[in-house]
Amino acid sequence: REWVREVQAAGLRLRVVFDGMLEPMKEGTAVQRGKENAAKVHGTLSKIRACKGNFGSMGVSGFVLPWGVIEVMAEALALEGVPARRALYEADAELARECVAHGAVGVLSNDSDFLCMRVPLLPLNELRVGH
């Protein structure tokens, strides 16, 4: 909530589009990512067990979104006045079209696919607002 408000205070209007259904041709990639995520979760749980409460020593990086988090995030964004919805399939093309149609500064994402779409990419993990 704080980050959204800081972005809005900086004069940026957010629009959020989440990925929708899995495209059939990308099923193999999704299965592989699912396996990688399962291994990541297993590794993190093992580290949690091993650290015995000293979480600073875990050295865990990356994350896996739990099921249902997109719906919760969409509701939270709506409470802050940010339009949020799901695309039919991948959100990339829809976001690129909206960027052009609304004269947006660019797309805030960590997905380099936008570079191929000739849409300005604003790396989400590098955006600094506020302080």
Image (spheres, grey):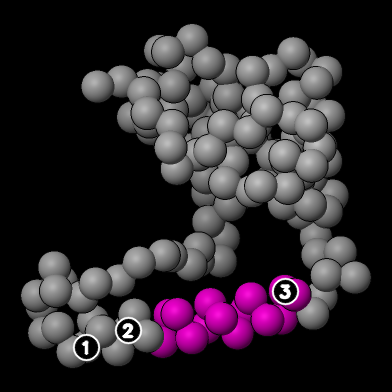
User: What residue would you read off at disc 2?
Assistant: 45
Q: Is residue 88 above or below residue 63?
A: above
In the rendered picture of this protein, how many numbered marks are placed on residues?
A: 3
Q: Quadrant of residue 3?
A: top left
Q: Residue at x 74, y 13 (%)?
A: 103
Q: Is the Cβ of the residue at disc 2 closer than 8 Å to that at disc 1? A: yes
Given contact means CB atoms under 8 Å apart, are the residues at marks 3 and 2 in contact?
no
Residue type at mark 2? Leu
- Foreground: 113 or 2? 113
Quadrant for the N terminus, please.
top left
Given residues 19 and 117, the one toward you in this image is 117
Depicted 42 relative to depicted 127: above or below? below
Magenta portion: prevailing SS class: helix
- Looking at the picture, which amino acid does disc 3 mark? Ala
Question: Residue 6: where, in percent of width, then height?
Answer: 37, 21
Q: Quadrant of residue 23?
A: bottom right
Q: Which residue is mark 1?
A: 49
Q: CA distance from mark 3 to mark 2?
A: 22 Å
Mark 3 and mark 2 lie on one chain; the one further toward the N terminus is 3
Span of residues in magenta: 29-42
Q: Is residue 46 left or right of residue 92?
A: left
Question: In which quarter of the view is residue 62 placed?
Answer: bottom left
Give the residue number, with chain letter if any, for mark 3. Answer: 30
Residue 108 percent across, percent down from the top left: 58, 34
Tell me the residue at 80%/64% (across/down).
22
Residue at left offset 45%, top offset 43%: 125
Instruction: Find residue 61 and report its horizontal and vertical position in percent.
Output: 35, 66
